[in-house]
Image (spheres, grey):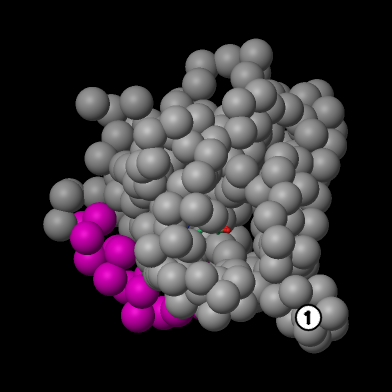
Amino acid sequence: MSELRGNVALVTGAGSGIGRAIALAFARQGARLGICDINEAGAAATVSQIEEIGAEAIAVSMDVADEAAVERGTEAVAARFGRIDTMVSNAGIQIVHPIEEFPYAEFRRMIDIHLGGAFLLTKACVRHMYPQRSGSLIYMGSVHSHRASPLKSAYVAAKHGILGLSRTMAIEGAKHNVRSNVICPGFVRTPLVDKQIPEQAEKLGISEADVIAKVMLKDTVDAEFTTPEDVADTAVFLAGFRSNAFTGQSITVSHGWHMG
Ligand code: NAD
């Protein structure tokens, strides 16, 4: 398969979890990759895995909340490969508290990484996409772009905000032949989720098994976790879509949690 041959993709948070799975799936389809992460060792490990499958990638150290780092990193990817066709704004963290205990600094950090990071990366990438007159902007939302859960005021606010940013980019990008969409996964067993299980158990006063069964997978149709590969397949579809008919949308990949 080579659905993305010639495609240059920049993926943030690609040193772990969903971002790494997307980068590997893109590489298998023939894309060249900018692997951006604040975790340099994680990014380097993803690059090694991509090289093992015979594709090209560079590791870029990038804190997505730092404007200068985002600009520098995006330019490094464009300089290496000559263009940027696909942006995957995926880097993220999770912090959970009831609002009365939520430190404002932690709320701000969540917004800065998820929403500020998406804004900064978009700005840096469209600088290359607009003159090329092509590009695909892909944002990592969540079922929490559409639904709310307790303890997650910052995450839910940021993930809802990403829908607004992407829809605006669908309109602004259209005249430059750039499309914009959001992927909304359900719960995926990555380090981000593994960290939350004991935290939520403590804060909600329930067992870890109940966090999985009664909180995370409660509204799925089959009590299954979504996998990083499920999300990666969705990203390949969006990156490779052959026209701009598909823009301004969000795709939920969640075993049926939130149908709509
Ligand atoms: P993960 O912890 O496995 O990976 C996140 C990556 O982002 C890590 O490599 C981390 O180093 C990087 N990162 C964190 N802060 C960064 C920063 N400031 N700058 C650059 N990189 C940074 O988590 P994941 O589950 O793969 O999450 C990836 C994305 O998917 C996030 O946006 C998350 O909100 C979203 N998401 C995850 C789930 C889930 O259940 N795991 C569900 C829906 C959406």
Left or right position of 51 against 62: left
Residue 18 versus residue 80: which sits nearer the camera?
Answer: 18
| Closer to us: 79 or 69 | 69
Give how far across and how far down residue 43 sits, in percent. 38, 70
Q: Is residue 46 above or below residue 167?
A: below
**Residue indicated by mark 1:** 102
Q: Secondary structure at mark 1?
A: loop
Where in the figure is residue 196, as x and y percent of width and height?
51, 71
51 sits to left or right of 84: left
Q: Specify whether residue 117 is in view.
A: no
Q: Which residues are magenta?
A: 32-51
Residue at point 24% right, 49% down? 55
Residue 111's image quarter?
Answer: bottom right
- Please give the name of the residue rendered at 42% of the width and 69% of the height, measured from the top-left corner: 208
Tag 1: amino acid: Phe
Q: Which residue is at a point 83% across and 28% down the rendered structure image?
A: 171
Dot 1, how many residues are within 10 Å of its Cα: few (below 14), some (14-19), or many (20+)?
some
Which quadrant of the rendered structure holds the C terminus?
A: top right
Queried whether the magenta region covers residue 226, the answer comes back as no
**Which percent across, then down, holds residue 234?**
45, 33
Q: Left or right: 208 with respect to 258?
A: left
Does residue 150 appear in the picture of this structure?
Answer: yes
Query: Considering depth in this image, is 104 or 173 the residue closer to the camera?
Result: 104
| Residue at 50% over, 53% down | 214
Quarter where residue 85 is shown: top right
Q: Is residue 188 left or right of residue 244?
A: left
Specify the principal SS of the magenta part.
Answer: helix
Query: Is residue 50 highlighted in magenta?
Result: yes
Of all residues shown, which one is farthest toward the front?
206
